[in-house]
Every structure is written in C-alpha cells, then in structure tokens.
Amino acid sequence: MQKNGNSTPVRVVVDAMGGDYGPHEPVKGAIEALDAGDIEIILVGDQGPIEAELARYDIAGKPITVVPSVGKIGDDEHPIHGLRHKPEASILVGTKLLKAGKGDVLVSMGSTGASMASSVMVLGLMEGLERPCIGGPFLGLAPRTVMVDMGSNVDCRPALLLSFAALGAGFAKKFLGIKSPRIGLLSVGAEEAKGNRQVQESYHLFQQSHLNFVGNVEGMDFFTDKADVVVCDGFVGNILMKFTEGLGSVLGEYLKQHLSRAISEQGAGTIISELWTEMNLPRKMGGPLFGVNGTVILGHGSSKSDGIAGAINTGVRCVDLDLVGGMRQELAEMYQSGALKVI
Amino acid sequence: MQKNGNSTPVRVVVDAMGGDYGPHEPVKGAIEALDAGDIEIILVGDQGPIEAELARYDIAGKPITVVPSVGKIGDDEHPIHGLRHKPEASILVGTKLLKAGKGDVLVSMGSTGASMASSVMVLGLMEGLERPCIGGPFLGLAPRTVMVDMGSNVDCRPALLLSFAALGAGFAKKFLGIKSPRIGLLSVGAEEAKGNRQVQESYHLFQQSHLNFVGNVEGMDFFTDKADVVVCDGFVGNILMKFTEGLGSVLGEYLKQHLSRAISEQGAGTIISELWTEMNLPRKMGGPLFGVNGTVILGHGSSKSDGIAGAINTGVRCVDLDLVGGMRQELAEMYQSGALKVI
C-alpha cells in the first residue's frame, strides 16, 4: 500500500464522483495534477459520465485509467448505511483498489463520513487505535501549526485525544520536518488547572506520555509558535475551521470596501483572493486521514479542480514521505511508553 | 440600582485599579468619558495614586469623586480567596457602592474572575440562575451576532446553557432592538442529530422553551444572519474569542506586507488598525456581565483609556436601556414556561 520507491510514479486513485462537483471537477483536477507531476491517475466512478468528461481532454498516451463503479454516497446519507446499500459506490471501489495494492494513495472530496467509514472498514485502523481523525495545518496564516482533530470526533475521552496527539506528532515530524514536535492541549488558559473536565483529565495523561507535551495552549496560540500540534476534540476543531471559513468571506467583503478608497479594484481583488486562500487552506491542499492503514486524502466538498489537484499533490507528498509509517511508529512508541493501552 | 430616569446623569463607578494599566488608564478613560457625555464618575482605588493621576487633569467643577479602597485583586489570584483576604479591594468597594444605590453602573477591567465573584456575592444572581456569564457581540465584522458564554463557564449542563440563552435574548432585545431574537446552538452541523452530547441534550431542552429557537448553527453562522444569539459553553466561547484576537494580529502583519505593494505605509496603517479594532470589539466597548442584579461592565485587562471610555459608554447605554430589567424578565418568562425550574 505504500510507495514503490522513488523510481516509479505514485499511483493516485481519485474518487471522481466525490464532492459537490463530481465528476467534472475531479476529472479536471486529476488531469491538471497529471500534467504537472510524474504520477499515474486511476479515476473511479460511473463509467459513462467519466468518459464524457475525459473526452474533453487530449489524454492520448497519458497514464490515466478508469475503474468503473456504480453510484456515490452523498453528504446527506448515513455513511455506514450508504456503504452497506451501495457496495459498488465509488469510494468503496477506490478504497479497495488501495487495499489491493493497485494504488498508492486515495483522494476523495467526500462525503467525508463515507470516506472515513470506507477507509476504516477496508484498510483498517492502525493497531490500538479506536477512531481515525482529520488533522493538519488549517490556516495559511499559521502554516506550521497542526490541529487535530479537525472535526471527526465530537466527544473525545482523554485516551482518544492522546492517540490523536501521537498521530499529529507523526504528521509534524514527517510533513513539517519537526524533530520533536511540541504538543499543546487547546484550553482556556495556560495553567494546568485551566480548562474543562476533558482537558484537565487529558493533561495528566499527556504528561505521562513520551510526547513533547508543552501544556495547555489558548486560542491565540495557533499564531504564537508555542506548540507545533494543537490538540482538541472534533467539536471545537470543526467550529474553528468553519468559523475561519466564514470569517474569510466577510473579511473579503470588508477589505473590498475599505481598499477601494486606496487602490484599484483589480489590485484589491488580488489581495482579497490571496487572503481567502490563506483562510481556506484545506480547500487548497486537502488533508490526510489520520490513523488508517493507507494514505487517504480528504478534500473539501466544494473544491474545484485546483483544490483537487492540490489534494493530489498533498497525497503524493504523503506517500513520498511515508506519512503512514511515521504515524504508525509514533503510535507504537506511545503504547510502548505505557501511556496508552492497546484496545 | 437602576437609573434615576432620563433627567439625571448616570453615575458610573469605575474600578480605577483594575486591568493591566490601573490606575493610569482607568482615570484617563473616565475623564475622556466624562468630557464626552452627561455622566458622573466615581473612581474607586488607592487614594494616593488616584489623586496623583487626577492631578494631571483640570477637573475643577467636574462631577468626579474618589472613594478610597485598599489594594486590588490580581489576575493571578484566586478570586474568592482574594475577596476574602482583601475586603477593602477596589472591586469589592465598587460593587458595594452599586449595591448601596450610590452608583448606577460599575465598570471594571478585571481581574474578570474577581469582578464576577464580587458581583455575585454582593449584588446576587437573578432569581433561579445558577451562574452568571459574559456575552455580547464579540466581532466588529459580525456586530449583531451575540455570543454567550464568552468564557466564564467551561463545563455547562443543558439547563445552564438555556438560562444563558434567555439572558442573551434579553440582551439582543434591549441592546440590539431585535423583537424576537433567533437563538442558535453552536454545533458542527445544522441537523438536530449533529453535535456532541452536550448540544444534543440541550437541543431538546431549547425546543421546549419559549425562546425563538432556530436549531443548531455552525462556525460560519456568526456571519450568515441565521441567528441573533449563538449559544455555546465558555470553553468554546473563550477559544473563539482568543483565536479571533490572535488572528487579528497576524492578519495585520499579513496585510502590512501585502498592502505595501499597492499603497502608502500610512494608508495601510489606517486600514490595518481599523481592522484590528473590528477583530477586538470587546476591547473597544467592554461587555456587560449577564445575570447579576446590577449593571456591571467588564473590559479587557489590556484596555487603554479609549477602551475604558468605550466600556463606560456601553455601561451608560445598558443603564438607559434597563438591560438588567430586560434580562430578568426574559429569565422569568423562561421559568413560567416550565422549561427551567427555579433552583
């Protein structure tokens, strides 16, 4: 399931039906990524529509193949129910290709729930792990601050948060090249006693682990370089992500009004659009699913082709860096340290 | 404790020792507010230092008096312990003036914990209420979205959240003039089933209340006009507040770099400083303490004189609008509706 060494191109399985704009944008994004890098593309989806999309491009001689599937699991469907009733859905077929070693990385724009459930079911969780999660940098203005969990697990016991911290540490080491990532628990004050019950209990568990735990951090510390990995449950993580997205939009409006006093509309437009990207980092690059036995990149459902190409690039990088191996090792050390017990 | 009708000036008690810059900035801010409006100022604090500060200004004939106190309760002190061991601390003396009817509103820059504890102890909580909280608009870019709780209560049972929702509704009616404020529960999805255990349990309780409950809202909905009052516990509220502050600072840096391509340093400086204010609304205007029997305005500890004058103005407005009466009525309706029981 891992990469084949640096000599052969990374094989990217793309769930072409995923997201709000499948298959049009996923196919377009896959071809953009193909033109830019030494990769192979395997498109999974409803055969007719995908071939109609492909007919728009000159793909003669390019390493792109289609693996047919039937239907997709929508955002409005219960993931498990969807997987059970649509055994040939694009996400399931794609995940099985990865499991069978026919691809090195799977890229999907969602539904996120279905992608996660399919990954857990087909690829399996890393040993000892109870749940997967989503993590990574989420803000271009804080590109070296990793947040886990970004929204997958709304109620987390301390042991689950600690396992996410280990995965985040593995990500920071591999993806950001940080030797001993500083782990912070997101709370309402720096002191040990500050925080809700969940954080207070987690604090003691984190202290006992092998991680480089720097204590509690606060909301502003995404920007203060106090921690490389900020750990919170998916409830807080999801709210912060969406808050930032919403703020990015109104900031654009605000700046449009205020910059028009001083500079041209075009100049303002460039600055605003660059800022919007900074506020919506996961839309630009997607993010790896943490904790499953395979490289799976999840993107924002509203991604257009550039976001899909960005997620593919992220995926290729994760394969090249052996992110999955790094996370697995970090988890194993956690269990060896005795701070967590294998469930 | 309420105002004396529109004919007489509002009497503002200022904790002159509070915040990071007491008594210098509180005295300066009080005089700025005095010069701008028809109010009376009662400064509470260590007599020598306050009189030294006052000596800088020409206050002859101005309605400003000093009530001496001894010491202050710092941010690093446990509030209850501080109140017990410093019975003449400025915040306690100030709160007692309010209780005795010698002032209409108390303004303090902190410590927040000591101001809250003093208010609860001296003024008392509104009938049936278990805890006070802090609320209000917290973002200039979303000036009509009220958030409760901004950070006072990190673990909240559903009944506590519902009482905060009632206080928020009272605030939105009085302060923002919204007839039937829409109440949203902050969660990770709009559907009823989305959210952590706390939100799911709260959802049902909120539905049974007399409030105009519009269901779950998400992080972006601070900006989408889906709800007038967004309810969350103080853990999430505090993280959002501080995240926004931190983001405001890095945004300033970001814009400084990017605007320098297009406009003068001075022009960029103006835009950046206006934006910073938008991202730090409570520093500009303070916010009322919700749920105590008196008008108490809390400001940010780092406030300078303009922030203190802003908090005083907010306080005068709260008195004029009878905010306390409005909140009390909203709570009473909640108990009459049977959704909450008086504890």
Image: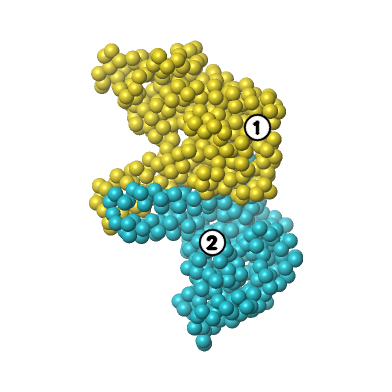
Chain colours: A cyan, B yellow
Residue B228 visible, this angle: yes
Give the class, few, some or many, for how many residues have Cα within 10 Å of label 2's Cα (few <14, many ≥20): some
Query: Could you tell me the amino acid type at mark 1?
Result: His
Q: Residue at x 50, y 76 (%)?
A: A31
Query: Could you tell me the amino acid type at mark 2?
Result: Ser
| Quadrant where the image shows the C terminus of chain A | bottom right
The CA span between labels 1 and 2 is 37 Å
Percent x, y of residue B204: 70, 39
Residue B16's place in the image compared with A79, above or below, is: above
Q: Residue at x 54, y 83 (%)?
A: A63
At numbered mark 2, what does the secondary structure look like: helix, strand or loop? loop
Percent x, y of residue A135: 56, 58
Q: Residue at x 65, y 32 (%)?
A: B210
Left or right of B191 on screen, residue B2? left
Left or right of B165 on screen, residue A84? right
Q: Nearer the viewer, residue A278 or A227?
A: A278
**Labels 1, 2: front one:** 1
Q: Which residue is label 2 attached to?
A: A302
Residue B309's place in the image compared with A222, above or below, is: above
Disc assigned to residue B210: 1
Residue projecting furthest to the front? B179
Q: Residue at x 53, y 51 (%)?
A: A242
Give the class, few, some or many, for how many residues have Cα within 10 Å of label 1's Cα (few <14, many ≥20): some
Q: Nearer the viewer, residue B152 or A178?
A: B152
Percent x, y of residue A154: 64, 50
At numbered mark 1, what does the secondary structure look like: helix, strand or loop? loop
